Image (tube, grey):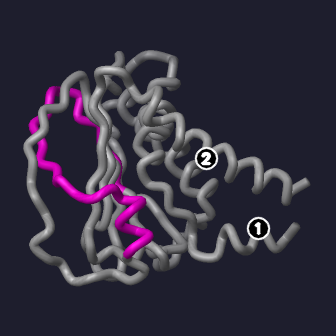
């Protein structure tokens, strides 16, 4: 039963990733950037570092929901939540106002990963681009705990909703949209679960 669950979950992630390009968020913008020095094939564990201000209870609720969805997604991809020296630290933040942000024009992450098994030195391959994000933006950043620097960030606009709303479906959609761009499973995870059959 557990083996079947893992395989079904993996297939679901792959299917969602394939559909994300077709369905997306319509006119809403989304994307991601990565560091050439990221050891993506070696990360196994994670923890969180960002929380909302406790002064705003409605915003805090959204952040707790986001934390839950992000944790579920990373665990589906084989990463383990850990309090002791996690490989990755996850930062997430909602910008409720319109946002001008800087991104990078890079090779597709999936393609770059296939051709780069090991992290490389930072080089001049970063081509900065300016982006205007409207209707609220969710930004998720993955940081290499050991190196203390960001290795990947994903973002999507259109997550602005009434912070006091009872519905959290828009937050779940936003997390899916972002992590459909981070199709990296924990090292050995797929092999472990395929051999378990």
Q: Is residue 28 visible?
A: yes
Q: Is residue 106 above or below residue 157?
A: below
Q: How many numbered dots are placed on residues in this image?
A: 2
Which residue appears at 35% of the width and 66% of the height? 112
Q: Which residue is mark 2?
A: 13
In the rendered image, the quadrant that contains the C terminus is: bottom right
Q: Quadrant of residue 49?
A: bottom left
Label number found at residue 193: 1
Does dot 1 land on a helix, a strand or a loop?
Answer: helix
Question: Residue 13, percent across and down?
Answer: 61, 47
Does dot 2 land on a helix, a strand or a loop?
Answer: helix
Q: Residues within 10 Å of mark 1 (few under 14, many from 20)?
A: some
Which residue appears at 48% of the width and 75% of the height? 41
The span from disc 1 to disc 2 (Cα, nearest Å) is 15 Å
Which residue appears at 34% of the width and 27% of the height? 159
Which range of residues does the magenta coloring cover?
91-115
Question: Residue 133, percent across and down?
Answer: 18, 31
Q: Is residue 39 magenta?
A: no
Which residue appears at 38% of the width and 25% of the height? 25
Q: Is residue 5 left or right of residue 120?
A: right
In front of the other: 49 or 124: 124
Q: Is residue 55 visible?
A: no
Question: Residue 12, percent across and down?
Answer: 67, 43
Q: Quadrant of residue 107?
A: bottom left
- Which of the two labelled residues, at mark 1 and mark 2, occupies the earlier sequence position? 2
In front of the other: 145 or 7: 7
Q: Which residue reaches farthest right? A: 1
In front of the other: 126 or 78: 126
Question: Residue 154, percent across and down?
Answer: 33, 48
Q: Is residue 145 left or right of residue 43?
A: left
In front of the other: 109 or 37: 109
């Amino acid at each position: 039963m557990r083996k079947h669950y893992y395989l079904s979950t993996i297939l679901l992630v792959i299917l969602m990733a394939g559909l994300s390009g077709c369905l997306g968020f319509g006119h809403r913008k989304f994307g991601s950037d990565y560091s050439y020095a990221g050891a993506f094939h070696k990360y196994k564990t994670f923890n969180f570092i960002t929380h909302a201000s406790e002064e705003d209870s409605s915003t805090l609720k959204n952040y707790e929901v986001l934390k839950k969805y992000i944790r579920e997604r990373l665990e589906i991809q084989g990463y383990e939540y850990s309090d002791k020296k996690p490989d990755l630290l996850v930062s997430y933040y909602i910008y409720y106002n319109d946002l001008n942000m800087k991104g990078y024009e890079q090779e597709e992450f999936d393609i770059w990963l296939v051709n780069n098994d090991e992290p490389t030195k930072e080089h001049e391959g970063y081509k900065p681009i300016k982006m205007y994000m409207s209707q609220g933006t969710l930004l998720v950043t993955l940081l290499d705990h050991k190196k203390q620097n960001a290795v990947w960030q994903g973002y999507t606009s259109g997550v602005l909703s009434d912070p006091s709303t009872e519905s959290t479906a828009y937050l779940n959609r936003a997390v899916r949209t972002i992590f459909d761009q981070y199709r990296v499973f924990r090292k050995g995870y797929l092999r472990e679960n395929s051999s378990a059959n």
